[in-house]
Image (cartoon, grey):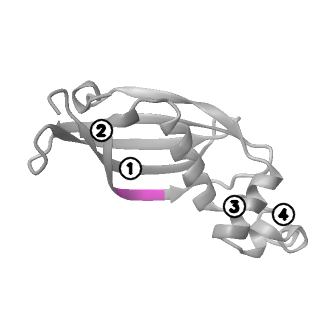
Amino acid sequence: MRFQELRAGRRFLTGSAVVTDGDIRAFAEVFDPQPIHLDFGAAAHGPFGRTIASGYHTLALSWRLWIDTGALGADALAGLGLDELRWVRPVFAGDRLSVEVEVLESRPSASHPGAGIVRLALSAHNQHGEVVLTYRTAALVRGSGG
């Protein structure tokens, strides 16, 4: 979608994905090798009683679910940053996550003619409707003339 189609207040709901033990382990082994993500025995004595997904895993999965909607597609030109990232609840193996995305702002870019800045609020929810992650992001998106 061109930035003009991504008007403030527009909302999207993504598909869902189930987080597995294998997913948690594979992500953590490469990107966040902490015992709470990798060691079932150590995690059993931790604050959650079992292994949890890395917050960065949850962030990456939430972004993938958003991208899979196709709303941005080839019109996304660049990411501009991430703000107000909050890990609200742990994500466990077996949790099914989906994401709600709200367009906060869409305006022409002063420095990139033919493109616009789109600000988004994303919140990931588990199968119980509980929020597990929230953040805001901005992107440079192609315009209808670009």
Question: Which label belongs to residue 49?
Answer: 4
Give the percent coordinates (x, y) of residue 127. 70, 35
* Comes first in the chain, label 1 or label 2: 2
Mark 4 or mark 1: whose residue is earlier in sequence: 4
Query: Which circle's residue, 3 or 2, is located before the other in the chain?
Result: 3
Q: What residue type is labelled 3?
A: Phe
Residue 126 inside the magenta-drawn segment: no
Q: Are discs 4 and 3 less than 8 Å apart at CB?
A: no
Mark 4 / mark 2, whichever is N-terminal: 4
Q: How far apart are marks 3 and 1 (CA)?
A: 23 Å
Residue 88 vertical placement versus 17 (above, below):
below
Front: mark 3 or 2: 3
> How far apart are the two marked residues, 4 and 1, measured between alpha carbons?
30 Å
Mark 1 and 2 residues: CB-CB less than 8 Å, in contact?
yes
The mark closer to the camera, 4 or 2, is 2
- Relative to 46, does residue 61 appear above or below in the rendering? above
Label 3 sits on a secondary structure element that is: helix
Query: Where the N terminus falls, by quadrant?
Result: top left
Q: Which mark is residue 104?
A: 2
* Residue picked out by circle 3: 27
Say what secondary structure mark 4 lies in.
loop
Q: What stretch is highlighted in magenta?
A: 81-85
Task: Nearest to the eye among marks 4 and 1: give it.
Answer: 1
Q: Label 2: few (<14), some or many (≥20) within 10 Å?
A: some
- Image quarter where the C terminus lies is top left
Q: Which amino acid does label 1 sit on?
A: Arg
